[in-house]
Amino acid sequence: MENTNTEQRKTIFSGIQPSGNITIGNYLGALRNWVKLQYEYDCLYCIVDMHSITVRQNPAELRRRSLEVLALYLAVGIDPEKNIIFLQSHVPAHAELAWVLNCYTMFGELSRMTQFKDKAAKHPENVNAGLFTYPVLMAADILLYQADLVPVGQDQKQHIELTRDIAERFNGIYGETFKIPEPYIPKEGTKIMSLTEPTKKMSKSDTGGGSISMLDDRDTIVRKIKRAVTDSGSEVKYAEGKDGINNLLTIYAGFTRKTIAEAEKEFEGKGYGDFKLAVAEVVADELGRIQAEFNRRLADKEQLNAILKNGSERAAYLARKTLSKVYRKVGFYILEK
Ligand code: ATP
Ligand code: LTN
């Protein structure tokens, strides 16, 4: 049932970077839950393009992908009437608050972030200051809108905890300014692993066979899943150490909306080959439907632009309120109107 009592409604903020191809990890871990949440909460769904440039991007591709992510949000069922959908770079308050929060975030705290350590190791030639302060911009995203809940995959939990610490520190110095947000992490599908290296998370920036993009065609999906790494056993059962099979079971359960136990039961007595084919089928069927809608949405550039314009106006209005409060509290001189 839709909660229409706006007085009681909590605020949700989340975002995805328009870097690389959105994967089924992003879908099961984030996007699909956003669709459910839109009926009960006031949601802001952002395309965080400013976060993307912490890793070198091709400008033409970044521009194209920003619109594609928007079309994908719409294709999976995120309603632009119900939610505020916008591009981060269209609302300057994100960068403005990030600067202030930088001055309330410790070097030591940022040094402990595992995403920073992973990405710095992956791109040793470009360990830039933006990559280091990435979580501060993320904290600004969330705190600007006084968000109650932040639906993300497991990998982002540490960033939300840091956001809470920054907000509490600021509130401690200046009095109640920011709402302290909670992470909102779904039970299943929180961490989809790479098909080729099932101990690592499936990632948008992996261009090998380890990730399934939301835009992959049926043949590609079948090929990637057939080649997915599994152990030498033969039973389709979730078990410690069987990372490959566990991951495929999680994907299957996610796409069929079944529990892992139900999925195991279904494949009792069947081998890995049959199981892999079934996984590929359910993934390809659902993605096929989403892709048809995606293509329809992407073709209507005028509508996409109108959604972004409306979204950034609504977001900017809300963001300004928090930013003004922050500027006043830290002691910036404000001109009378
Ligand atoms: P990149 O590979 O470029 O670092 P990413 O795939 O981690 O990107 P993000 O834009 O950083 O994607 O994340 C968007 C959302 O998707 C976040 O909520 C994140 O937690 C979730 N997410 C990303 N990868 C996975 C995954 N493998 N399993 C579940 N959720 C995921
Ligand atoms: N860092 C996030 C993307 C992100 C985000 C946010 C998520 C940027 N700002 C604010 C939730 C709320 C990631 O998923 N890698």
Image (spheres, rainbow, N blue to C red):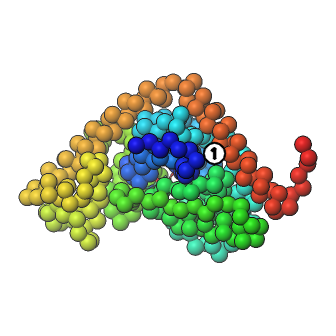
* Snapshot quadrant of residue 247: bottom left
* Snapshot quadrant of residue 241: bottom left
Residue 263 appears anywhere in the view: yes
Q: Which residue is drawn at 56% across and 67% down?
A: 161
For disc 1, the neighbor class at 10 Å (few under 14, some 14 to 19, many from 20) is many
- Residues 189 and 247: in front is 189
Q: Which residue is drawn at 53% across and 62% down?
A: 182
Quarter containing the N terminus: top left
The location of residue 188, given as percent across then percent down, is: 34, 58
Instruction: Please say if 322 is above or below 302.
Output: below
The location of residue 260, given as percent across then percent down, is: 24, 59
Q: Which residue is drawn at 73% across and 49% down?
A: 321
Residue 206 appears anywhere in the view: no
Residue underneath mark 1: 88
Q: Residue at x 64, y 51 (%)?
A: 145
The location of residue 154, given as percent across then percent down, is: 44, 62
Q: What amino acid is at disc 1?
A: Gln
Q: Is 272 placed left or right of 327 in the picture?
A: left
Give the secondary structure at mark 1.
helix
Q: Is 315 placed left or right of 253 in the picture?
A: right
Instruction: Please say if 303 is above or below 259.
Output: above
Q: Is mark 1 within 8 Å of ligand 2?
A: yes
- Residues 52 and 311: in front is 311
